[in-house]
Amino acid sequence: MEEDQDAIQQKLQRFLAPPIATTQLAYEIATLLKSFGRKVDPRLVAQRLAEHFASRLTYKSEALQDLIKYRPIELTNVAHQAANLAHQAAWEDIKTKALPIIAAQKKVRRKIKAQGERRLRTKQAKNRYEHLERSYIPKLGAIEREFSARSALLSLYPWPVTGFCLDEIFHGGRYPMSGGVDSLQWLFGLTRKKLSMAKPPIWEGRRCFYDYRGVLACMEALLKQAGSDAYWLPDPARRKTVLTGIVFRARQVAKPRIRKAFERKLLPYLT
């Protein structure tokens, strides 16, 4: 038990209070010194160096060292939660920055002069839409990517690997079949044809969406395929890791009826 606690303390020390890289620090100091020229006032050099590095250097935190030494398990729990929050915050930051850029792009359309041209442009627009809808297929689906890759920080404690891509589904939300991020194609990394088992469809105007029932229908159909020819999670060890993480995450955040549905469908594949 003592050796395990020492190992945890060492890992916390490396990740929460890492030493400054002397090579990088020396390179930046040399770069600043070269920018001053030959004849400079030492006080000016000191001032410039202080301004450059003040925001990057911190005092050694005795409180943090005490936490690492005397409360490693509790601090590991906090570190795990902080890593999850940081991951989610980074993803929300990406969305927040990307949406205004997309909205700011203005498209100037040429005026239509003939009815035939209108029909042709309508057909071309539909073809472009279908091409974009079908073409966004990531090499690795979000479920497999997030629920199988353990970060160095999360490896401090043996929790199942989890992610955030299914949280919207766990909360009762719904995704379209395709259309980029937040779609079934994005979740599974497969074409619409290979996800045709998704049901029941939920129509909102002209768009079709799927909730947790559609996601589970896809999972159940894909998990029945085994071996190297399986479309999704062909490796048995990786499959077990991903499914364990999904059930663990569902028990953390999903609504009760959705959690029970995921447990009922996925637990038989973990026995």
Image (cartoon, rainbow, N blue to C red):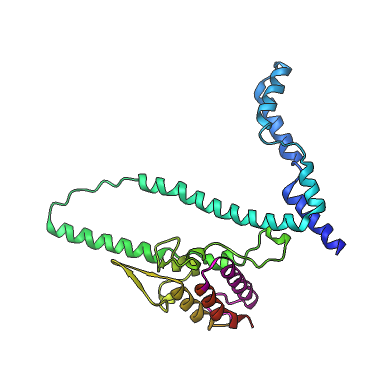
Q: Is residue 240 above or below residue 13?
A: below
Q: Residue at x 48, y 65 (%)?
A: 171
Q: Residue at x 84, y 57 (%)?
A: 6
Quadrant of residue 81 in the image? bottom right
Point out residue 270 in the picture as x, y percentages from the top left corner: 62, 80
239 is higher (above) or lower (below) than 65: below
Along the line of sight, the residue nearer the viewer: 125 or 251 = 251
| Residue 232 percent coordinates (x, y) | 53, 75
Quick one: quadrant of the N terminus? Answer: bottom right
Say if residue 173 shows up in the picture.
Answer: yes
Front residue (pair 242, 134): 242
In the orientation shown, which residue stands out farthest toward the front? 256
Residue 175 part of the magenta-drawn span: no
> From which residue to which does the magenta span run?
227-256
Q: Is residue 229 left or right of residue 41?
A: left
Q: Position of residue 95 (x, y in %)?
A: 47, 51
Q: Is residue 185 left or right of residue 242?
A: left
Which residue occupies 60% across, 75% down? 239
